[in-house]
Amino acid sequence: MKNLNTVLHYFGIVLIAFAFLQALPLIISATYTETVTFPVRIYAIPAGISAIAGILLVGVFKAYPLVEGTAMAVGALGWFGLSLIGAVPYWLALKITYLDALFETVSGFTTTGTTLFVGIDGLPHSILFWRAFTQWIGGLGIFTLFLLVALRSGISHYMLRTESHKAVSKRFSPGLFSSLRILWMIYGTLTIACGLLLWWEGMSPFDAIVHAFTTVSTGGFSSHDLSIAYFQRPGYHYMAIEYTVILFMFLGGTSFLVHWNIMRRRFASLLNNMELRLWIALIVGATLLVAFGGAMNAGLGERLRESLFQVVSIATTTGFATKDIAGSLFGPIAKQVFLILMFVGGCVGSTAGGVKVLRIGLLGKLVWHQLRIVSRPSNEVVPFISDGEVVGEPEVYRTAAIFFSWTAIVVVGSLITGLLSGFTPLESLSGTVSALGNIGPSYIDPAAYVNITAGLKVFYIMAMIAGRLELLPLFLIFSRRVWR
């Protein structure tokens, strides 16, 4: 039971830190004088629960040194625990079922962006802020925010690996503290720059903050039912807003190590970056296929802009929309391209979801590597090289395991979705890929999605968390050995 005590102790530390974040919407509520009709208890209760539960866990359970498996269990448990508490404001304020509140919270923390809410424009500002803030917190992974608390334990590098696709595979600097500081500096700078540009382009300060949070985090929650299309009206520089969102979605879906190398003017390293080359080629190729493979009758410039927006939104798993990807505007080729983009996702070390471009590239290189092996003498050693470095077997095995697990869950999940709903095979497939890839949009009609069964909601909640954790940590919490 030593491992269980340790996991609960560190989970308690995270709960204490989360209590302060849970109370932040009170500032927004007071700013917009919502406290008259919108009681303080809506945010004070979950903040108090988080603080008290955290203090009790830290006081009762003693911490022992963590190993990688139990550190991953802390990460997986944290996503469930914080989602359970983070759902309370929705449940108390909007008079919805707790399951719906939990679904919305998990969709926020995992930056999926799928919503069960209707009438978003009429929601209180503090609720809209909390929705956006959950995505911003989740953008780099909840635990990267709390790693500083665990630095003294010496197990921070293990906790970092619970979300290996959010933290860079190569550290920015030798020290973990320094690496995290750089990571959050880049994330914060991108958020501020995005917010200021959107404000300058006509958004209100509140809308600019909300959309900056959910653009850079590649989450996709909006403060309006029409998403980015809401700003296609007088008073807004719509085209500038659209291009700004495209830019920062792309930056959010690009590895933060690339941003750091650009800041340090290490341009040579970018030329040899396989993932970056594939990422840009994917965006460009997909945009051209969508623009010229659909039914759009617009001019060339508008056609390319609208196609680029949808492609970047799907590829980065943000999920903002200006057009309905399931509508007649996009032809069969375009819809197949969108489905492929949903599966692949963004870059490793970014805020995006999906399988990741790097893993697809590594698996492609693995095929070529095997061809080289069989064409050479049996006694010749043929190293597996990517970006000029030898890739070790553990990384290859991990990549293959994640890809296989991803594919298996998509297949099984599509069957479960079809069993628990009346959706078509394509709708069932896209719904599962959307949840597991933390994307949001799918080929399921939004009106039908709001009315999915409780069983399907639970499955999608599990899929969203599994996708955000890269599958393996979630599997670990069901292993008896981890808790001994």
Image (tube, rainbow, N blue to C red):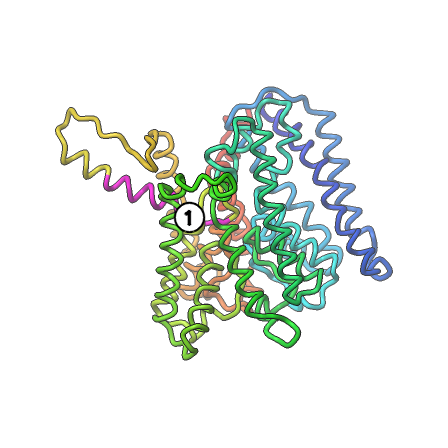
Residue 363 % position (x, y): 31, 42
Residue drawn at x 12%, y 29% as measured from the top left: 377
* 37, above or below 354, in the image: below
Mark 1 element type: helix
* 363, above or below 41, in the image: above
Question: Can residue 15 be seen here?
Answer: yes
The magenta region covers 352-368
**In the displayed structure, does residue 454 sit left or right of residue 275?**
right
Tell which of 270 and 473 is nearer to you: 270
Residue 82 % position (x, y): 65, 42
Identify the image quadrant of the C terminus: top right
Residue 181 % position (x, y): 61, 35
Question: Can residue 404 be seen here?
Answer: no
Identify the image quadrant of the N terminus: top right
**In the displayed structure, does residue 45 sit left or right of residue 171?**
right
Residue type pointed to by label 1: Ile
Dot 1 crowding, Cα within 10 Å, few <14, some 14–19, many 20+: some
Whether residue 416 appears in magenta in the rendering, the answer is no
Whether residue 355 appears in magenta in the rendering, the answer is yes
User: Which residue is identified by label 1?
Assistant: 409
Residue 173 % position (x, y): 52, 30
Of all residues, the one furthest to the right in this rendering is 36
Quarter of the figure with residue 283: bottom left
